[in-house]
Image (tube, grey):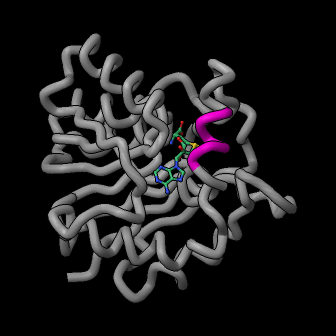
Amino acid sequence: MDKKFWQSLYDSGSPRFDVGATSPPLVDWLDAHPKAAGRAVVPGCGYGHDVIELARRGLVAVGIDYVTDAVEAAREAAQQAGMSARALFLDQDIFALGSEHDGSYDLFFEQTCYCAIDPGRRDEYAALAARLVAPGGLLLFVVYPVDGHQGGPPFAIDSSEIGPRFIRDFELLQMGPPVRTSKPTRVGKEQFAVLRRRI
Ligand SMILES: C[S@@+](CC[C@H](N)C(=O)[O-])C[C@H]1O[C@@H](n2cnc3c(N)ncnc32)[C@H](O)[C@@H]1O
């Protein structure tokens, strides 16, 4: 899937994957961890709902997406929410991030970027997460879709692949069904994982 493909979904005006609000599993995690602080990164951030929420909670959050229209809409939403000082957006390919990002995030939030990229790049995605997250930092992962379907995007995820794929650099702290899924239609197809960057 390339940038043109994603652009075409945004051109429709209501991309089917957009939750339209902050991801409920992220809200629940933030509610349970009110002391979360520092810098957060959200790859494939789309319209930026999660980035803006992280900023509302006091973090400096950086959303990255290579569809310019999505990034512009996200910046506009951040401005309307009064969060543009802490909700920052980069219009670029996540796999082309420069070394200035290395180890500079305390929290990495993944929702439907891992399932959006070519499955052949999943090891590269794990390496990217390892590069971006500071030692001791967290990777919060909404694992969707866990349904074994063929084709994509979204490309199916086997939840048992996450631990081994990330194990070199991350310890898997938690994996299980979220209290609330990111969308009602995703009930039974979603897991929520928390991984910690090894020190
Ligand atoms: C399924 S959408 C999810 C968007 C958002 N996380 C959400 O939940 O609404 C996947 C997003 O990843 C972006 N994306 C895919 N590959 C990318 C890449 N290599 N670099 C930057 N963005 C990418 C797409 O443009 C799209 O916005």
Near-viewer residue (96 or 152): 96
115 within the magenta span? no
Near-viewer residue (173 or 155): 155
At a point 20% along the width and 69% down the height, the residue shown is 99
Q: Is residue 138 left or right of residue 104?
A: right
Which residues lie in the magenta part?
3-8
**x and y percentages locating residue 4 in the rendered image:** 62, 43
Quadrant assignment, res 17: top right
Quadrant assignment, res 194: bottom left
- Please state, as top left, top right, bottom left or bottom right, where the C terminus lies in the image: bottom left
At a point 31% along the width and 29% down the height, the residue shown is 52
**x and y percentages locating residue 104 in the rendered image:** 16, 62
At a point 45% along the width and 74% down the height, the residue shown is 126
**Placement of 43 over or under 19, stated as above or below:** below
Near-viewer residue (74 or 157): 74
**Placement of 97 over or under 113, stated as above or below:** below
Q: Is residue 74 left or right of residue 103?
A: right
